[in-house]
Amino acid sequence: MKTASLLARPGHDITGEMVTGREDTDARERDAVAAALTKAFAAARPELAVTPGLGRALADAVAAAARAWPGVSLPAVRFVAALAPRLAADRPVEAALAELCTGDLYLACACVDGDPRALAQFDRLLVPIVERAAGRRGATTSQQTELQQIVRERLLMPRPSAPEESHARIAEYSGRGSLRAWIRVVATRETLRLLGRPQREVPGDDEAIAALMPADAGPEVEHLKQRYREAFKLAFREAVAALTDRERVLLRQHALDGLSIDRLADFYKVHRSTTARWVEGARRAVLEQTRRALGRRLHVAAAELDSIMRLIDSRLDITLPTLLREPGEAPGGPGRRRSG
């Protein structure tokens, strides 16, 4: 009996062997999945011819991509709808499909949809790529951390104020080259942009104290400033240096770059109360470390230290942008630097 006739007979698999029970159910499910994926593909690329084996080829591509990123969640139909427009029109569909980096495209699509595990996997790709790109050009550890955040924002965060970037740029990844290479291009460009500008040192400590204790704040504040200026400088340096990378990045995003709690929540794909708690925790870390550092240096009564800390707490939001700027960085964030 010919295989072609067997395929038309219910209860047989493609080899002609009888299948029953669970095997028959699995075969029907595979056929249903292949049909759904073919339909999604045809809707996205109606001008392309649909071949008999397309559904199975799409199902195999989805399964292989999902295996490459365990735990990452992306509906198969959604993936095919994103994959279809990226196929070359001048090639047979199955051949064009084989030329795409479907695993990397699967991860990129899941990142666009905000899947937390996809974002975590993307970060594991991004960090070493940025470190190598920045390290080859002599970037400091702090600059490398900053560059990591810049690249994250460039690729993962939409910019509603810029119509051409109203979507996350990772949605533009074509899948025709590796995702690592695509990230590397962006990382190299941002490294050159950050490090290639003229820089000069700015008196950050004095600016921080001026923001904390302005000249018109009254004689008591002026007395504190004159008496404890050096202690304040050292305490602020220690407090910022003691921040974790995550705390420093969050405070820079919020206090220096001006990202609201809602925008941070959208970026990190968490509830706004979570980002509010993160930012407040980082802010408290600055205050706690500053208090410890001042306590070691000032040797004042607890009541006087409490009074000093109340002043610092009340004006910390004004002072933070100055404390968090890197040497040579102008007010306004990492994208703008002072020329010398």
Image (tube, rainbow, N blue to C red):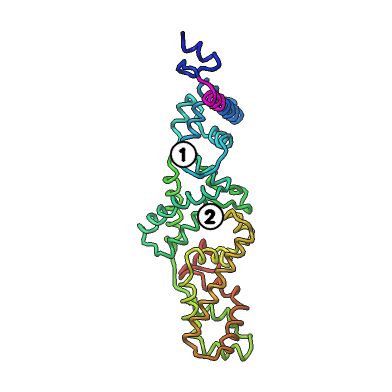
Vertical position of residue 315 compared to residue 245: above or below: below
Under mark 2, the amino acid is Glu
User: In the image, is residue 14 part of the stretch drawn in magenta?
Assistant: no
Q: CA distance from mark 2 to mark 1?
A: 27 Å
**Residue at the image point whose x is 56% and y is 86% from the top:** 305
Residue 284 pos. (x, y %): 56, 73
Mark number, residue 67 = 1
Nearer to us in this view, 130 or 118: 118
Mark number, residue 153 = 2
**Residue at the image point whose x is 42% and y is 45% from the top:** 181
Q: Which residues are magenta?
A: 19-30
Under mark 1, the amino acid is Arg
Vertical position of residue 262 compared to residue 240: above or below: above
**Residue at the image point whose x is 54% and y is 13% from the top:** 9
Which-is-in-front pick, marks 2 and 1?
1
Residue 269 pos. (x, y %): 59, 53
Image quadrant where one finds the C terminus:
bottom left
Residue extending farthest to the front is 21
Vertical position of residue 199 compared to residue 137: above or below: below
